[in-house]
Image (cartoon, helix red, strand yellow):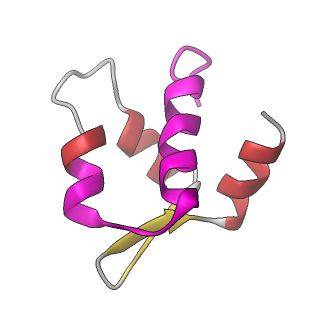
Amino acid sequence: MSETLRPLILDLVAHVAERPRPYAEVLDAWRTSCPRLTVWEDAVDAGLVVLRDGMVSASEAGRRALAGR
């Protein structure tokens, strides 16, 4: 995870840790076409968020990352 993007990625994880959110809502808020801002992609690649039944939530690894913030 890029140290530059880490705060943004953890913001995304915190957003879905509050409560599971619909996939479309999360992508609308966090996806970007800028190749330097890969917040959603990095969170998924790092296993910090999970998608189940159309809902995005923080994974156990995501919750640990938030706790170690």
Magenta: predominant secondary structure element? helix
Q: Quadrant of residue 38?
A: top left
Q: Residue at x 53, y 36 (%)?
A: 11
Residue under the image location 27 percent in, 65 percent down: 23
Residue at the right extreme of this rendering? 68
In the rendered view, tell whether residue 51 sits above or below residue 58. Answer: below
Q: Image check: 48 left or right of 65? A: left
Residue 34 rendering spot, x and y as whole percentages: 21, 21
Question: For the magenta stretch, what is the residue range?
Answer: 1-27
In-image side of 11 versus 68 (left or right): left
41 horizontally vs 69: left or right: left
Residue 69, percent from left and from top: 78, 33
Tell me the residue at 78%/53% (across/down).
64
Is residue 16 located in the magenta-colored stretch of the structure? yes
Residue at image position (32%, 17%) is 36
Vertical side of 37 occupied by 23: above or below: below
Q: In this view of the protein, which residue sits in the foreground, 65 or 1?
A: 65
Residue 39: name its quadrant: top left
| Magenta stretch contains residue 47 | no
Q: Residue furthest bottom?
A: 53
